[in-house]
Image (spheres, rainbow, N blue to C red):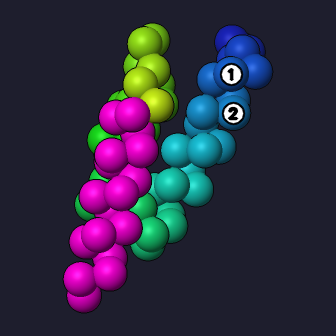
Amino acid sequence: MTQKSVPDLIYDKFAEFVGRDSLFSGISEGLLKQVRAKKKSEKEISNLLSKGKDEDSGT
């Protein structure tokens, strides 16, 4: 049995909750890609979250 590293376990749990939370619908895949990327961009993540917030407020 292969043990996962702590960062991988944290990411898996984060991905599980983001995937289930309706607040992240439509942006969850992009958000997870940005969080998992080796080179993280705070600006890109913020833009993605803002996009989700704008889409949610428009309904």
Residue hosting label 2: 10
Q: Please provide the residue range marked out in magenta.
A: 43-59
Q: Residue at x 68, y 21 (%)?
A: 7
Q: In this image, 50 relative to 58: left or right?
A: right
Q: Residue at x 53, y 44 (%)?
A: 15
Quadrant where the image shows the C terminus: bottom left
Q: Residue at x 34, y 34 (%)?
A: 44
How far across and how far down the image is residue 16, in percent?
Answer: 56, 50
Q: Residue at x 36, y 57 (%)?
A: 50
The quadrant holding residue 17 is bottom right
Q: Is residue 39 visible?
A: yes
Q: In this image, 12 relative to 35: left or right?
A: right
Is disc 1 surrounded by few (<14), some (14 to 19) or many (20+) residues within 10 Å?
A: few
Element carrying mark 2: helix
Q: Amino acid at mark 2?
A: Ile
Label 2 with label 1: CB-CB less than 8 Å? yes
How far across and how far down the image is residue 18, in percent?
Answer: 51, 55
Q: Is residue 25 visible?
A: no
The quadrant holding residue 27 is bottom left
Q: In this image, 46 relative to 58: left or right?
A: right
Query: Is the stretch drawn in magenta largely helix, strand or loop?
Result: helix
